[in-house]
């Protein structure tokens, strides 16, 4: 397929909407004019950062900029919603074209225009809570998360595990009071990381897994 294969169905579609359409005008793939409205479409076979930057640069010419791409490209199948959100944030429209279709081969996925994502208050509060609760900066930004991330929750679990390692089986209430961590009881009960063993009502000890993994997490928490 060539980018030029996308032009005939797109031109037919725009002409039907009342535009006068011409191609390759001042380095723009497609320019369509209707009264005082100027519309520019850049035809591409894929989407990448270079193409997005080119489309943003075209906003110097008119507010109505579209990227036209063929149907069936992988990013449309895997990341359609996120792609549309990005295009709207950039103020760029997106047109999907089926070059094999003679009728109805053009789908305007989104139009150009201002876009402001709705902030989810609960998630915003969760972000600030985690930031404020986390002690220090034990993670390396941009590194792989395959080995797990040091969260505020994990830091609390480490403190509990250290206490159990040093003091043996202990009641949850005693752990909470000793390390001054009011969340000790639910952390021990939920046992998210498999570090604890419940011996009786409210009594816990460090599990073999906890004993094995604790040194590495202590090391990472101290960096």
Image (cartoon, rainbow, N blue to C red):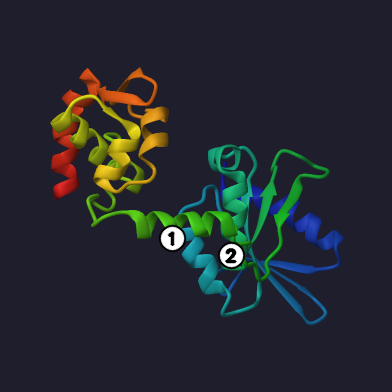
Secondary structure under the numbered disc 1 in the rendered image: helix
Can residue 42 be seen here? The reply is: no
Find residue 40 and report its horizontal and vertical position in percent.
65, 68
- Which numbered tag is attached to residue 128? 1
In depth, the one of 189 and 145 nearer the eye is 189
* Location of residue 38 by image quarter: bottom right
In depth, the one of 29 and 71 nearer the eye is 71
Find residue 181 and report its horizontal and vertical position in percent.
32, 46
Quarter of the image with the N terminus is top right
Q: Is residue 36 left or right of residue 120?
A: right
- Which numbered tag is attached to residue 89? 2
Numbered marks: total: 2
Q: Is residue 95 above or below residue 175?
A: below
Find residue 20 and report its horizontal and vertical position in percent.
79, 70
In depth, the one of 20 and 152 nearer the eye is 152
Query: Mark 1 or mark 2, which has the lower sequence index?
Result: 2
Q: Is residue 34 left or right of residue 171?
A: right
Q: Is residue 166 above or below residue 114?
A: above
Find residue 102 and report its horizontal and vertical position in percent.
80, 42
Circle 2 packing at 10 Å, graded few (<14), some (14-19), many (20+), is some
Q: Residue visible at 65% across and 76% down?
A: 63
* Distance from the alpha carbon under mark 1 to that under mark 2: 24 Å
């Amino acid at each position: 397929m060539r980018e030029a294969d996308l032009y005939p169905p797109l031109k037919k579609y725009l002409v039907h909407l009342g535009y006068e359409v011409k191609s390759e005008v001042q380095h723009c793939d497609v320019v369509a004019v209707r009264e005082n409205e100027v519309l520019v479409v850049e035809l591409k076979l894929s989407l990448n950062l270079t193409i997005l930057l080119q489309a943003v640069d075209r906003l110097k010419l008119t507010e109505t900029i579209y990227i036209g791409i063929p149907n069936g490209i992988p990013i449309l199948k895997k990341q359609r919603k996120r792609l549309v959100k990005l295009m709207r944030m950039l103020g760029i429209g997106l047109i999907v074209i089926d070059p094999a279709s003679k009728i109805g081969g053009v789908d305007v996925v989104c139009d150009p225009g201002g876009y402001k994502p709705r902030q989810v208050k609960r998630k915003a509060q969760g972000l600030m809570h985690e930031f404020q609760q986390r002690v220090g900066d034990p993670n390396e930004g941009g590194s792989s998360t395959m080995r797990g991330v040091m969260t505020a929750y994990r830091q609390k679990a480490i403190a509990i595990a250290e206490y159990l390692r040093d003091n043996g089986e202990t009641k949850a209430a005693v752990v909470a009071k000793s390390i001054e961590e009011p969340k000790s009881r639910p952390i021990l009960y939920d046992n998210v990381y498999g570090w604890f063993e419940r011996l009786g009502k409210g009594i816990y000890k460090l599990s073999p897994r906890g004993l094995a993994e604790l040194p590495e997490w202590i090391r990472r928490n101290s960096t």
